[in-house]
Amino acid sequence: MNNWTNGIALSGVRDSVVENCEVRLPAHDGISLRCTENTTVRNCMTFGARHGITIGGNFRGRGSFHTQVANCRVSRAWDTGIVVGILSYDVLVTGNLIKEIGSHAIDIFNCRKVTVTGNQIHNWVMPGMNPYPGTFRQAVGIFIHTDWGVTRTIPTENITVSGNTVVCDYEFTLPLEQQRGEKKEAAIYYSPICLQITGDLVRNVTVTGNTLTGGAKGIHITALPQKEMQSAKPQDGTPQNLTVVGNTVTGQKFTALECSGNGIPMRGIVANNLFADYPTGGWDIGGTGLVEHNNVK
């Protein structure tokens, strides 16, 4: 099978609806929207594939505009559940169930005006699903970032994440091979993060009213990875204008909140959140410049 085979693919179309469809085991995307306008995907189910549902554009500057993904069920994608990618604008992802994903559940990058609300995410970076696991697998329930490489100069901005439930409840601290009784030297370690905001042109992000339970880390706010900062302007290394308010973050094994800016200040507020049931030292806003107010921790 061609590795780029999609289940349903719309490209260059407008005023379209994909509804009540079931897609199983394509090679790449279950449902792919490329360079579309006024498109809705609702009440669909995807199983398997690399990505469950992908929204994006192309490297010639054309994106997808005014898109809704609503009330869909995405499971067992070996890479990402729902992708909102390059040059997407005005996207609503709401009421979906994303479960048992090999890497990220919802991945948001190089796009503008995206709302992710009222979704349920249950277990991502699942052991044994990704065919290219390496020795360390770290992935995110809701991941907001700029991509690396040729698309790195395209901002990710005006993102709202609200009212989502993100739960990781599988035993990830034991290497997969040890769980199977195999030799320790071949161990693969897993580190699920509930929500991560990673810098470099990430701006105007609101995270509010979400419930994040379990995993290795609850909320992780960080600069662009050091290896990617070689060509970055110093002021572009961290996310800016962040509002993290009114979330419930509980039961993480390592950190409930971890912020690191590599010495580059961030702007934003972390307020009125509940952080509970995490290890000593598992709450660190650091010297990032973020304002902390009235959190229960």
Image: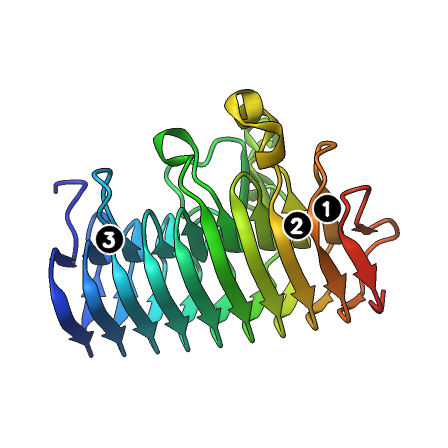
Q: Quadrant of the C terminus?
A: bottom right
Q: Write the residue at 27% across / 76% down.
A: 42
Q: Tell me, yes or no, whether the two marked residues, 2 and 1, touch with CB atoms within 8 Å.
A: yes
Q: Which residue is mark 3?
A: 29
Instruction: Give the Cα distance between marks 1 and 3.
Output: 33 Å
Q: Which residue is mark 1?
A: 259
The structure's colour scheme is: rainbow
Q: In terms of sequence position, does the residue under pointer 2 or pointer 3 come before the other?
A: 3
Q: Position of residue 190 (x, y in %)?
A: 58, 44
Q: Is residue 105 visible?
A: yes
Amino acid carrying mark 2 in the image:
His
Q: Write the residue at 49% across / 60% down.
A: 159
Amino acid carrying mark 3 in the image:
Asp
Front of the two marks 2 and 3: 2
Q: Tell me, yes or no, whether the two marked residues, 2 and 3, touch with CB atoms within 8 Å.
A: no
Q: In terms of sequence position, does the residue under pointer 2 or pointer 1 come before the other?
A: 2
Q: Which mark is residue 67?
A: none
Q: Residues within 10 Å of mark 2 (few under 14, many from 20)?
A: many
Q: Quadrant of the N terminus?
A: top left
Q: Write the residue at 27% across / 71% down.
A: 45
- Identify the element where label 2 is drawn: strand
Residue in the foreground of this view, choosing between 27 and 249:
249
Instruction: Give the Cα distance between marks 2 and 1.
Output: 6 Å
Front of the two marks 1 and 3: 1
Q: Residues within 10 Å of mark 1 (few under 14, many from 20)?
A: many
Q: Position of residue 120 (x, y in %)?
A: 49, 72
Q: Which mark is residue 220?
A: 2
Residue 275 sits above or below residue 131 on the image: below
- Identify the element where label 3 is drawn: strand
Q: Is residue 173 visible?
A: no
